[in-house]
Amino acid sequence: MAEKISDETPNPEKINDESPNPEKINDESPNPLAPSNDEESITAYSKDQNRKKQMMCLLYIILFAVFQTGIILLFVLIFMRITNPKFRVRSGSFIDAFNVGTEASPSFDLRMNTQFMVKNTNFGHFKYKDGTVTFAYKGIPVGNAMIEKGRVGARSTKKVDVVVKLRSNGLSLNIRDNELGSDISSGVLPLTSSVKLKGKIYMMEVIKKKKYAQMNCSMEIDINSRTLGNIICK
């Protein structure tokens, strides 16, 4: 009886062969960590959108920098460009003394009410110092006009009235007899005027730049009509 019982005991190797294989179970079970196709698409789309936003931000920064640079250049070229003001003879009239000799005895002694013009085209005001306008006949001084210091506003024009005495007593005898006598005979007395007014241009009370208003004009006195005309300034 004992031998029969021992023959019926289960075989452990057989039991092990029938037990489930854990590797097989793992292979058949779904992997919860693997992303699905939809998740991968969403991630790729999000990265693409972030990249586009970064590119747009960079583009806006570049455009803003270019715009700011253009504004600064425009400001410098237009508003900060400083030029010399202009000083000119605008008109002249003879109010009382108008003494002109003859061709045989040439001379002149005139009193001319002269109007000058200071034109400032800058975006800052111009302050100038005292100056002296010299009137000349054939390069020889025949009269002076004192210009007092003053101020011209930004992009504006200032008129200055000065009485000038013009006399021929400083001319040489040769010029009187030859050239002045001929001009008196023709009825036209040519003159020139020149000056250099030194000053400064003030931009927003911060920038100060030395400039000057220079004048070189030619003109003619009509002896018969007692008028000043044909004024040409450079």
Image (cartoon, helix red, strand yellow):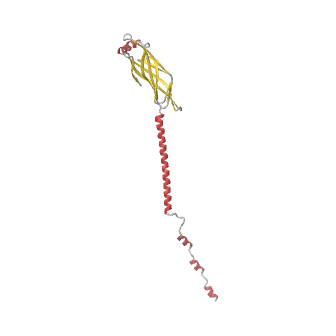
Specify whether residue 84 is in view.
no
**In x, y percent, where is residue 183?**
37, 15
Placement of the N terminus among the 4 image quadrants: bottom right
Residue at image location 50% in from the left, 56% down from the top: 46
The vertical placement of 172 against 115, above or below, is: above
**In x, y percent, where is residue 163?**
46, 18
The vertical placement of 46 against 172, above or below, is: below
The vertical placement of 214 against 167, above or below, is: below
Residue at image location 50% in from the left, 61% down from the top: 40
Depth order, front residue of 139/67: 67
Residue at image location 44% in from the left, 21% down from the top: 115
Residue situated furthest left in the rendering = 186
Specify whether 199 is left or right of 3: left
**In x, y percent, where is residue 98?**
41, 14
Placement of the C terminus among the 4 image quadrants: top left
**In x, y percent, where is residue 104?**
37, 10
Residue at image location 49% in from the left, 62% down from the top: 38
Depth order, front residue of 2/50: 50
In which quadrant of the rendered view does residue 187 lie?
top left
